[in-house]
Image (spheres, rainbow, N blue to C red):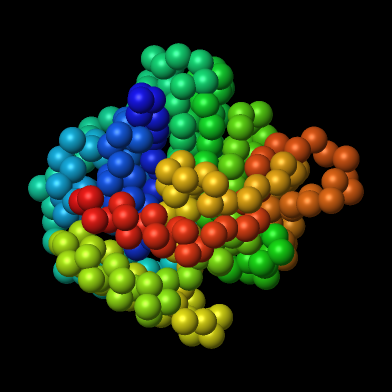
């Protein structure tokens, strides 16, 4: 029996971040959650940290520590996505001020202190929002890098095209400079971009299957998804919307669901029209050294089988 994987989940809840958190909470034998750090993204930081605490409370995970991080990108003004997630960031469920506490330590200090105290190649970072916290921590204390086992992130787009501009996905668009630091950090990176998350669509049938689980957490998940998916359904004319962030957690739980390719990805930070583009060199035309494993295909039925199996546990 392997020891649980020590992880830090960095997120901007966001309905799909909430599903990712619940999926991670469902497998304590797999994830040793050292802490959940929050960042400004889908909604401002005061709401993403509140939302992370609320999800913990609903999932009865009083043991999980929540930290607040950066309230704006490293060098740019914050861009948020209330048009997708609603004003609260978790529209779809009843929002209240949770009793679950916010830790006093800043998320950047928590990340640095935790990594500095860890063994080399031991901690997995799972960012599902803009990379501001991770990029800032690396810039502030580069000696944390050898401690990182792997970074499994949701962000970017290539063949699918962007969801904020024609060339950029939201998480990378919001903080391209932070993303540039992360993608150049030299540690193993797995990228769950729109190229793969747009294959993981909820659909009415799949949502009904989750709702039939009948638990408080399953109800929260389906209420959140039912609100959140409307935006992508209207935009892409699909039955259901993509579950972006849970793909990172599903990869840890069942990596065989995904097909990956080692490629070079470079972040556009200068472009006026292409700010935040993940320039993905699928066919090695640049000669630039591969720096990520890029997920390009997923067994979507297998993903939802896993999600249902795990949600029944919490
Ligand atoms: O583009 C999708 C990503 O942006 C997801 O992480 C979603 O939560 C938002 O943060
Ligand atoms: Ca997110």
- Name the residue rendered at 61%, 29% in the picture: 187
The residue drawn where x is 28% and y is 30% is: 105
Q: Is residue 149 above or below residue 250?
A: above
Q: Is residue 293 visible?
A: yes
Please give the name of the residue rendered at 66% of the width and 29% of the height, measured from the top-left corner: 186
Q: Is residue 161 above or below residue 236?
A: above
Q: Is residue 102 left or right of residue 233?
A: left
Task: Count the numbered circles shown.
Answer: 0
Q: Of residues 58 and 266, which is closer to you in this image?
A: 58
Q: Quadrant of the N terminus?
A: top left
Q: Position of residue 29 (x, y in %)?
A: 30, 34
> Which sits in the foreground, 184 or 45?
184
The image position of residue 34, as x and y in percent, is 32, 30
Q: Name the side, left or right, on which 266 lies relative to 288.
A: left
Whether residue 74 appears in this view of the structure is: no
Query: 160 above or below 256?
Result: below
Indicate the position of residue 33 as horizontal and vertical percent values.
Answer: 32, 34
Question: In percent of the image, x 53 and y 36: which residue is there?
Answer: 151
Q: Position of residue 314 (x, y in %)?
A: 20, 51
Q: Residue furthest front?
A: 1
Q: Give the side of residue 29 with respect to residue 54, left or right.
A: right
Residue 160, by quadrant, is bottom right
């Amino acid at each position: 029996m392997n020891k649980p994987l020590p992880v830090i989940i960095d997120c901007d809840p966001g309905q799909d971040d909430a599903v990712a958190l619940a999926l991670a909470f469902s497998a304590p034998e797999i994830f040793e959650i050292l802490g959940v750090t929050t960042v400004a993204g889908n909604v401002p930081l005061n709401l993403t940290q509140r939302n992370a605490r609320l999800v913990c409370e609903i999932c009865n995970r009083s043991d999980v520590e929540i930290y607040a991080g950066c309230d704006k990108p490293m060098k740019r003004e914050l861009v948020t996505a209330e048009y997708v997630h609603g004003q609260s960031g978790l529209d779809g469920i009843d929002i209240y001020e949770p009793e679950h506490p916010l830790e006093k330590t800043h998320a950047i200090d928590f990340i640095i202190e935790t990594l500095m105290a860890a063994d080399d190649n031991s901690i997995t970072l799972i960012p599902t929002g803009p990379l501001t916290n991770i990029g800032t921590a690396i810039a502030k204390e580069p000696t944390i890098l050898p401690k990182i086992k792997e970074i499994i992130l949701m962000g970017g787009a290539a063949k699918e095209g962007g969801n904020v501009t024609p060339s950029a996905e939201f998480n990378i668009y919001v903080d391209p400079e932070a993303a540039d630091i992360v993608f150049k950090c030299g540690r193993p990176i797995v990228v769950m971009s729109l190229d793969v998350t747009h294959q993981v669509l909820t659909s009415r049938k799949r949502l009904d299957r989750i709702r039939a689980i009948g638990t408080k957490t399953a109800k929260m998940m389906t209420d959140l998804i039912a609100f959140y998916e409307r935006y992508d359904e209207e935009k892409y004319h699909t039955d259901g919307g993509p579950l972006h962030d849970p793909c990172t957690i599903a990869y840890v739980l069942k990596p065989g669901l995904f097909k990956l390719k080692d490629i070079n990805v470079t972040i556009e930070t200068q472009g006026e029209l292409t700010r935040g583009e993940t320039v993905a060199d699928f066919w090695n035309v640049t000669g630039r050294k591969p720096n990520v494993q890029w997920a390009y295909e997923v067994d979507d039925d297998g993903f939802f089988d896993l999600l249902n199996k795990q949600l029944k546990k919490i």
